[in-house]
Amino acid sequence: MQQNSITHLFYPPRCPICDGILGFQEGLAHEACRRRLIYVKEPTCLRCGKPVYSPVQEYCLDCTRKTAVFARGNLFDGGASVWVYTKEMQESIARYKYHGKQEYARFYADEAVKHLGGWIRERRPECITAVPLNRRKLRVRGFNQALLVARQIGARLKIPVDDRLLVRTRYTLPQKELNPRQRLANLQKAFGPGDRASKYASVLIVDDIYTTGSTMQICSMILKKCGAKKVWILSLCIGSDY
């Protein structure tokens, strides 16, 4: 019996969508489970990439409310996401983050490159980074879920990954418990520049979930203030206007 077969027998991989055991030739996810996911498609917001109602709607509701801030030129220059944040992906990412399912990162990165690799290459980022975790969360969780995916995306696309551009300076309340204004206030002093924040002129920031964009907004502002000319964002999942 080959080594891969033995490994699969004793340590069978699990589908990142349903967490069921995968057959030896089933790939990284059950095909039936994969079909249950909603991949982000046009029309999308021209700024953050969130699905919108119709092609004539240029920006999502959240980005429309931030028009004045974007006009000052200190936020991200564009964004994209792989999936709409449905129940299936909510449960998948919860297991990934809170139950140590680090093996899911391979599937997430593969799908990101498959569906957004061209979009990333067109923007030619000098490096990829990830939204940092507070030390307390990192100690409890054991890994930064966004950085793990960022590293795998970088390896596939041969783009350097640098985790020293941003730092988390204090613990914050979970964003899902707050309204948009509270989210921004909660994050104002939560991030700071790392010791390599001014090294790159163009950066792609990776995170797992994009909701109102407050986290990406703060991270982008920091990098722009440190000299970045272009900052793009990529998330695994994103909400929608419908």
Image: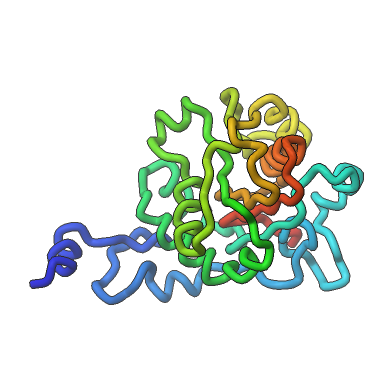
Residue nearest the viewer, comparing 83 with 76: 76
Work out which quarter of the rendered image holds the N terminus and state it. Answer: bottom left
Q: Residue at x 60, y 67 (%)?
A: 116
Residue nearest the viewer, comparing 123 with 174: 123
Relative vertical location of residue 89 with respect to residue 222 in this rendering, above or below: below
Q: Residue furthest left?
A: 1
In which quadrant of the rendered view does residue 45 lie? bottom right
Number of labels in the image equals: 0
Q: Residue at x 52, y 40 (%)?
A: 163
Q: Residue at x 72, y 60 (%)?
A: 50
Q: Residue furthest front?
A: 199
Q: Residue at x 70, y 39 (%)?
A: 223
In which quadrant of the rendered view does residue 196 lie? top right
x and y percent of residue 141 in the render? 41, 35
Q: Is residue 67 visible?
A: yes
> Which colour assignment does the render follow?
rainbow
x and y percent of residue 24 in the render? 24, 73
Residue nearest the viewer, comparing 183 with 1: 1
x and y percent of residue 68 in the render? 91, 44
In which quadrant of the rendered view does residue 57 lie? bottom right
- Left or right of 201 in this view: 103: left
Work out which quarter of the rendered image holds the C terminus and state it. Answer: bottom right
Q: Is residue 91 visible?
A: no
x and y percent of residue 230 in the render? 74, 51
Relative vertical location of residue 72 with respect to residue 64 in this rendering, above or below: above
